Amino acid sequence: MLRIKEAIIVEGIYDKMKLEQFVEAVILPTDGFAIFGDEGKKRLLRQLAEKHGLVILTDSDRAGFMIRNHIKSFIAAEYIKHAYIPEIRGKERRKRHPGKEGILGVEGMTQEIIADALLKAGCNRAYKCPGPIITRLDLYSDGFYGREGSSLRRRKMLELLGLPSRIPVSALLQYLNALYSYDEYRSIVDKISSTYI
């Protein structure tokens, strides 16, 4: 497993799923061109960039470069690293036809090619966790998941943290662990409990 300190930005959910097979990092899809109008996701990217740095890993087609350039327009250059995949002709297994330009995207690349691209981009490898991590059990115990009223409580947390309201629980855990220490999480829980109960 390749552990990367920076958050990795990819275009879509299939790219994210591909990376999750062998990379341990915060991996955030832009949902294609949806990033252009998603202010919540842009705010999240800025937070991740300032805390950990970003690695942009988009397809090598025109759309991938448009998304890459858009991210560069609202994140300072010192927080961004660029990982590039080669232009290899073909189509992804799940697709019936190749893409418009006939080249493979991130999801169609081998693990070796992707790992090489990340390391050539200058990604920092993570070697150990700095402290206790926030778990799904913590979210359950604190009433943010799987309990009566948990969706409202979770929405309050997302609002307080300035995160998009549609983040699923698994992604929320990933972002909390990327942006906050366990002690900071406990402070957030206390603030929500005293404010909203």
Image (cartoon, rainbow, N blue to C red):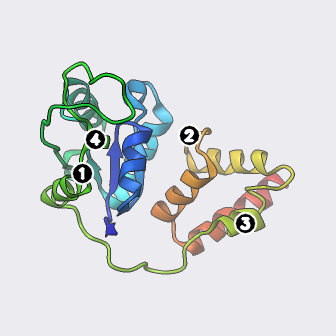
Q: Amino acid at mark 4?
A: Gly
Give whichever of discs 3 and 1 has the lower sequence position: 1
**Mark 3 vs 2: CB contact within 8 A:** no
Give whichever of discs 4 and 2 has the lower sequence position: 4
Q: CA distance from mark 3 to mark 4?
A: 44 Å
Determine the residue positioned at 23% across, 35% down: 104
Q: Residues within 10 Å of mark 2 (few under 14, many from 20)?
A: some
Q: Would you name the residue on which mark 1 appears?
A: 110
Q: Quadrant of the N terminus?
A: bottom left
Q: Nearer the viewer, mark 3 or mark 2?
A: 2
Task: Determine which quarter of the picture holds residue 30.
Answer: top left
Q: CA distance from mark 3 to mark 2?
A: 21 Å
Q: Amino acid at mark 2?
A: Pro
Q: Position of residue 170 (x, y in %)?
A: 58, 54
Q: Position of residue 44 (x, y in %)?
A: 45, 45
Q: Would you name the residue on which mark 2 appears?
A: 164
Q: CA distance from mark 3 to mark 1?
A: 44 Å
Q: CA distance from mark 2 to mark 1?
A: 31 Å
Local secondary structure at mark 4: helix
Q: Amino acid at mark 3?
A: Asp
Q: Would you name the residue on which mark 4 appears?
A: 108
Q: Nearer the viewer, residue 139 or 94?
A: 94
Give whichever of discs 2 and 1 has the lower sequence position: 1
Q: Position of residue 176 (x, y in %)?
A: 54, 60
Q: Would you name the residue on which mark 3 appears?
A: 190
